[in-house]
Image (spheres, grey):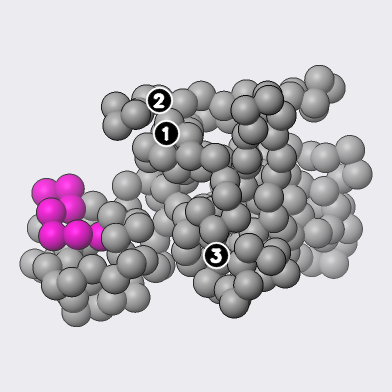
Amino acid sequence: EENFNGYFRKTGVQTPLEARYGINATGNGSLWHTTDRRFSADDEPNEANRFGWVVEIDPSRPNSTPVKRTALGRLKHEGAWVQEASDGRVVVYMGDDEQFEYIYRFVSTLPWRVARRRGVSPLDDGILYVARFDANGTGRWLPLVPTNPALAGWTLNDILINTRGAAVAVGATKMDRPEWIDTFPKHLTAIATLTNNSRR
């Protein structure tokens, strides 16, 4: 849900979480808050937390209920690019499409075939990571989990709702509006497109 913050208005004092996700008094010019109080963050302070998730829709089952994939974190997802790892686990790459935001990946706990046999989705459980790129040309994936010492005191719910804040806490690399990501497993390569950053 890219740019979901624009639907909301907050005329009072912003909480740190609202400020981090851009919930403010201007929004994108829509007037939803005047006709539906759920879009007034003053009246419904937790409603914006329902937005910013990847939603899975099964096109082969048009009457099925869409599922919010909360394990993939809450951000301004440009998209979600799915890859099968060599051991059958599912890897999802994601960009948070805003200046100075981050690149993420999710790795499922179960191989997808095992998950399907158990009647669950591989996207139900796994580890969310954020990318750090170092000046020497190397990089690493930093786990966004409560056992990470940099996230001491954070619960998993805290991390998933405030994924951006968790990325800051672990020292991820700020990017220039990360968007599309493509992977080339045979070459152990992923390529991300970045739109711009006029604030650098």
| Residue 160 % position (x, y) | 55, 65
Q: Which residue is drawn at 19% across and 79% down?
A: 43
Q: Residue at x 57, y 27 (%)?
A: 192
Q: What stretch is highlighted in magenta?
A: 23-30
SS at circle 2: loop
The residue that mark 1 highlights is 177
The residue that mark 2 highlights is 195
For residue 198, side relative to residue 159 (left or right): left
SS at circle 3: helix
Identified by mark 1, the residue type is Arg
The residue that mark 3 highlights is 160
Residue 53 against residue 133 in the figure, above or below: below
Numbered circle sitting on residue 122: none
What is the residue that sits farthest to the front in this orientation?
136
- Number of numbered discs visible in the structure rendering: 3
Q: Earlier in the sequence, mark 2 or mark 3?
A: 3
- Marks 1 & 2, CB-CB < 8 Å contact: yes
**Mark 2 and mark 3: span between their CA atoms?**
25 Å
**Mark 1 and mark 2: span between their CA atoms?**
5 Å
| Residue 101 % position (x, y) | 45, 43
Does 68 appear in magenta? no
Tell me the crowding category of disc 2: few under 14, some 14 to 19, or many 20 or more residues within 10 angstroms, Cα based: some
Q: Is the magenta stretch mostly helix, strand or loop?
A: loop
For residue 110, side relative to residue 103 (left or right): right
For residue 158, side relative to residue 198 (left or right): right
Identified by mark 3, the residue type is Leu
Q: Earlier in the sequence, mark 1 or mark 3?
A: 3
| Residue 178 % position (x, y) | 48, 33
